[in-house]
Amino acid sequence: MGRKIPGKKHKGVKDPFKQQAKRQAELETKINAPPKDTDEQAVPKSLEKVVKLKEKVKSGKITKTKKKKKKKNALISVGENYSKRLHPKARPEKVVPMFQQRPGESEEEFLYRVNRDTHAFINESAFERKYSVQVNRNPTTGVIEGLSKCEQTELDKIEMLRAKHKNIKKKKKKKDMDKPKMTKAEKKKQKLKLKKQKQMEEKTDDFDSFKDEVQFGEVVHEPPQLKIRPRNANTISTSKPGKKELLLHSMLQKGEKSKANSKKSISINKSGKRKNLPIGERRQLEKQQSDVIAAYRMLKAQRSAGDN
């Protein structure tokens, strides 16, 4: 709930006609009411202001500002002679030239001469700043007499380094701008080209580069034989299968010796499948197999214990 605003309290009885007349008098100047007399037209306020200004000028409250008349034969002079206080170690400032119109010289010719000499002065000051030299001129004639080298201050060195850094940045930007900009289609084509190249590299085999050139009518009766053995090749590793040095060689050699010493030797025909062999031979083979497996396990256990 908001604050209750109390209304106006009527003290006693007030005349409503007087109140209405008072309100209308306040609103007379604020409302765009129709004219009281239709035959007469009131003077506009803008005209009233003009009349008041004329009366003030006549009475002397407002004075007219008179424009300064130019002399007909007056010569134009441009430039100001001023002296600025500088640090004793600072480089002396270049004197700004004064321009005076010559007698018989038109205004256009004078302005052209001022423009030309100003550009020359700016270029000269830029040359002096760039090469840290001072152009010596004759004070009377203005002819160049020579150049004198200025001593470099710390501020000059800092400015030179800053300018050098800006030039490097500009060169880099120019190089980037000189590169031809690729369109979206060209970028897409380049991307696909790189992708295809990568896929081709992955697919290529090292042996594809080796190609044997076969002449017309050449006949080959057998594949080539490698008669030369590699230098560091092991004789056992490159030998035929069954002749490698295995873990059970020692056990097998002992078994062969014992069999040779034994008077009876049973020969088992190992050709064909085991299920087709007789029951006795099958049992003998299975026993030999289990003995070999047990011996292999025992040797492996001994070797692992020795390593530990």
Image (cartoon, helix red, strand yellow):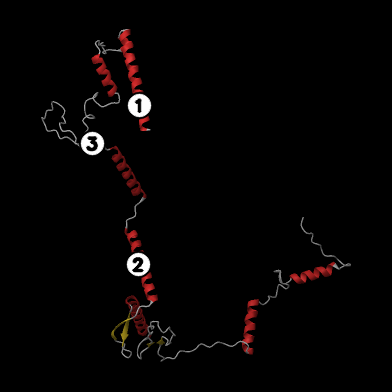
Q: Where is residue 105 in the image (x, y as percent from the top left)?
A: 35, 88
- Structural distance between the alpha carbons of marks 3 and 1: 41 Å
How crowded pointer 3 is (Cα within 10 Å; few <14, some 14-19, many 20+) is rated as few
Q: In this rendering, which labeled residue sits more in front, label 3 or label 2?
A: 3
Q: Mark 3 points at which residue?
A: 207
Q: Position of residue 213 (x, y in %)?
A: 15, 35
Cα distance between the residues tagged 3 and 2: 54 Å
Residue 300 is marked as 1
Q: Work out whether residue 96 or residue 201 is closer to the camera in this orientation and state it.
A: 201
Inter-mark Cα distance, 1 to 2 = 78 Å
Classify residue 175 by image quadrant: bottom left
Circle nearer the N terminus (3, 2)? 2
- Kindly identify the amino acid type of the residue bearing the numbered disc 1: Lys
Q: In this view, does 44 lie above or below 217?
A: below
Q: Give the x, y percent position of residue 185.
A: 35, 48
Q: Which residue lies furthest to the right in this view?
A: 12
Label 3 SS: helix
Quadrant in which the N terminus appears: bottom right
Specify the quadrant of the image occupied by residue 15: bottom right
Question: Looking at the picture, which amino acid does disc 3 mark?
Answer: Phe
Task: Specify few, some or many for label 2: CA neighbours under 10 Å numbering under 14, 14-19, or 20 or more.
Answer: few
Are discs 3 and 1 less than 8 Å apart at CB? no
